[in-house]
């Protein structure tokens, strides 16, 4: 089991499954959303994810004319988990506070659009675009 929360603790969740590993997205949308070189996420089945508190503090921004949205905490602005598709959730890996000791980056996605200054320094498999494992 893994547990996580936002920076202020208003939103918290648990995951009752082994997500397998971390996907790191380097696309320009994720870079702008986080202000960094992208976002590291784990992907879990919807039925393995439970909000413990704070669903009322979730805010959402959807990019116009794109199939992309980001959830964030209304209090502290931390990125929050959201629906990846009908069956799965994405969870920002940096929110994991308990149980994530064995997580490692397995896949880097949208590497073809990564920032010029971004150097990938781990052994995760690099994909020029999307990858669904």
Image (spheres, rainbow, N blue to C red):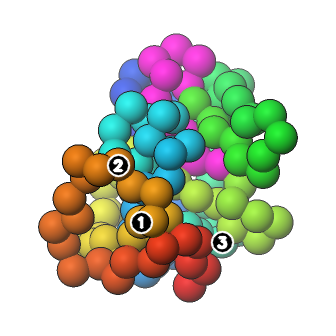
Residue at x 46% of width, y 29% of height: 78
Does residue 129 appear in the picture of this structure? yes
- Specify few, some or many for label 3: CA neighbours under 10 Å numbering under 14, 14-19, or 20 or more: some
Q: Secondary structure at mark 2?
A: loop
Q: Quadrant of the C terminus?
A: bottom right
- Specify few, some or many for label 2: CA neighbours under 10 Å numbering under 14, 14-19, or 20 or more: some
In the rendered image of this protein, does residue 92 appear above or below residue 43? above
Q: CA distance from mark 3 to mark 2?
A: 30 Å
Identify the residue under disc 1.
111
Residue 74 on the magenta segment: yes
User: Residue 70's image quarter?
Assistant: top right
Kindly check if marks 3 and 2 are in contact, taking CB atoms under 8 A apart as contact: no
**Numbered badge on residue 115:** 2
Q: Residue furthest top?
A: 75
1 or 3: mark nearer the eye = 1
Helix, strand or loop for the magenta stretch, by majority: loop
Q: CA distance from mark 2 to mark 1?
A: 9 Å
**Numbered badge on residue 125:** none
Residue at x 63% of width, y 36% of height: 71
Identify the residue under disc 3.
45
Q: Quadrant of the N terminus?
A: bottom left
Q: Earlier in the sequence, mark 3 or mark 2?
A: 3
């Amino acid at each position: 089991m893994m547990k996580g929360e936002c920076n202020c603790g208003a939103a918290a969740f648990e995951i009752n499954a082994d997500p397998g590993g971390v996907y790191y997205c380097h696309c320009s949308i994720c870079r702008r959303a986080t202000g960094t070189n992208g976002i590291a996420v784990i992907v879990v089945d919807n039925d393995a994810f439970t909000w413990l508190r704070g669903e009322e503090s979730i805010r959402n921004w959807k990019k116009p004319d794109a199939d992309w949205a980001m959830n964030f905490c209304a209090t502290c602005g931390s990125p929050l988990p959201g629906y990846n598709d009908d069956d799965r959730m994405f969870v920002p890996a940096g929110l994991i506070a308990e149980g994530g000791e064995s997580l490692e980056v397995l896949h880097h996605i949208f590497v073809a659009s990564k920032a010029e200054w971004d150097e990938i320094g781990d052994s995760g498999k690099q994909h020029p675009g999307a990858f669904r494992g």
